[in-house]
Amino acid sequence: MQQQVNLRNKYGQLLDYMKEIGYKDSSIRYMYRTVQKILSVTETPSAEDYEFLINQQKRYSPRHDIRIVKEFDLEGKYPIVNYKRPLKEHLYGALVGEFALVRNSYKDIALKRGLVPKTVKIYTAVTSVFLLYVHNLGRRRFCEITEADIQHYFTQGKVGADQCKYIKSVLSDCSFLVNGNSIKRLIGLFPQMPRQQKLCDFLTKDEIVAIQKVILADDSNLTLRNKCICIIAMFTGLRSTDIANLKFESIKWDKNEIVLVQSKTHSVVRVPMIPIVGNYLYRYIIEERPKVKSDYVFMTESNWVRPIQARMIYNVSEKLFKLSGLRQDGRRRGLHLLRHNLAISMLHNGTEISVISNILGHKSPETIENYLWSDIELLRKCAIDISEYPVTNPIFTETYGKSNI
């Protein structure tokens, strides 16, 4: 790309590009204001001028906008698109050759492998943004992508370890469609990015006691329907969407189990229906459920009777936590915490990980690792005792204050 004389003559290309790929009007206005601030200093800013302006900013957002202008002005690079930003489909029409073949073929390949449509959609979106980026750099084949292209994409584009994994997975699955050696070389250039472990929030023992007290109390102001929903979440670990979609055919009274197809993974899950779950289900159906013909178990409590929706389940959890007096300070509260608590409880009781994954309906047993990392008590048992190591006490007192070590 031939660089022009000054920023004023070409910044319109940057704004047009942002508009074309789907940036919000407010973001484009902020970028325009950023350019005007830079032009108020000089119309031909150097790298030193940009660094001076960046260091003057106290907040991240202005610094980030100036860096975008800097890369566009001095290097001719357009901003890297975050895959979560909805891109206009016509942009992907620019992909040709190997890039277009991989993007258009991956969906069918992944679905045949058994991946759920939601996962395929995410993997495709992440990889499409990457392919569009290298395409805008003038690359048309995988063998033309350089190490500098890769490093810039992953260091400047806020691309994390998960996105890196998604792209490598797509390229590996589609390597037989193009030159396998060029794909292997390209994957070797991807950086080794540490994955940030996602910790699952879960309830303490005191919180569980308070919640159980509200659910089982006769005067708790919770309807039978809401009590039943909370008990199912607590003792089966079903997600809110699956509870809302629960049908009579899913309740196997003779086998004391609930069998359904999960909304998230589209896989069949079987969960045991212990007596308290079965008793409350029976009581709700007989005593409180509206007498309407519907395959769904849980109905709304309004005048317009209809099957409950997943978003209404959160209102149930709001009532539960309010009556329990828990987490009214803004911390997470929802029935999904009961699912986490069930997983942690089974881990404490020595249940095999494969059994826990089957009950929770995980597609992969590796998903249970998130619960393992969240269990502080279990991590303490795995910790190494350093009392015998030659570490002087002042190190602990100077670093952490007075220590009990």
Image: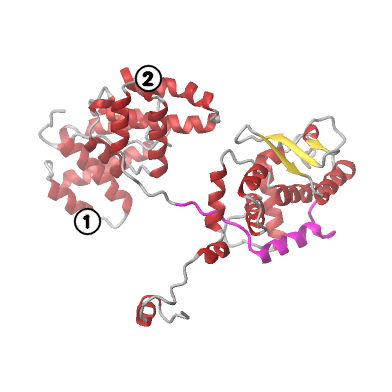
Q: Secondary structure at mark 2?
A: helix
Near-viewer residue (301 or 281): 281
Q: Quadrant of residue 396?
A: bottom left
Disc sitting over residue 206 in the figure: none
Residue closer to the observer: 294 or 117: 117
Instruction: Please say whether residue 307 is one of the residues in the magenta stretch.
Output: no
| Callout 2 crowding tier (Cα within 10 Å): few <14, some 14–19, many ≥20 | few
Q: Amino acid at mark 2?
A: Leu
CA gap between label 1 and label 2 equals 47 Å
Q: Does residue 95 appear in the picture of this structure?
A: no
Q: Is residue 54 left or right of residue 263?
A: left
Amino acid type, callout 1: Asn
Q: Quadrant of residue 4?
A: top left
Residue in the picture at 37% in, 39% down: 164
Q: Position of residue 213 (x, y in %)?
A: 77, 62
Q: Which residue is mark 1?
A: 55
Residue beneath the point at 81% across and 30% down: 294
Badge 1 or badge 2: first in the primary sequence: 1
Q: Nearer the viewer, residue 359 or 167?
A: 359
**Region in magenta:** 197-223
- The x, y position of residue 208, in whole percent, is 69, 61
Q: Is residue 215 magenta?
A: yes
Q: Which mark is residue 177?
A: 2
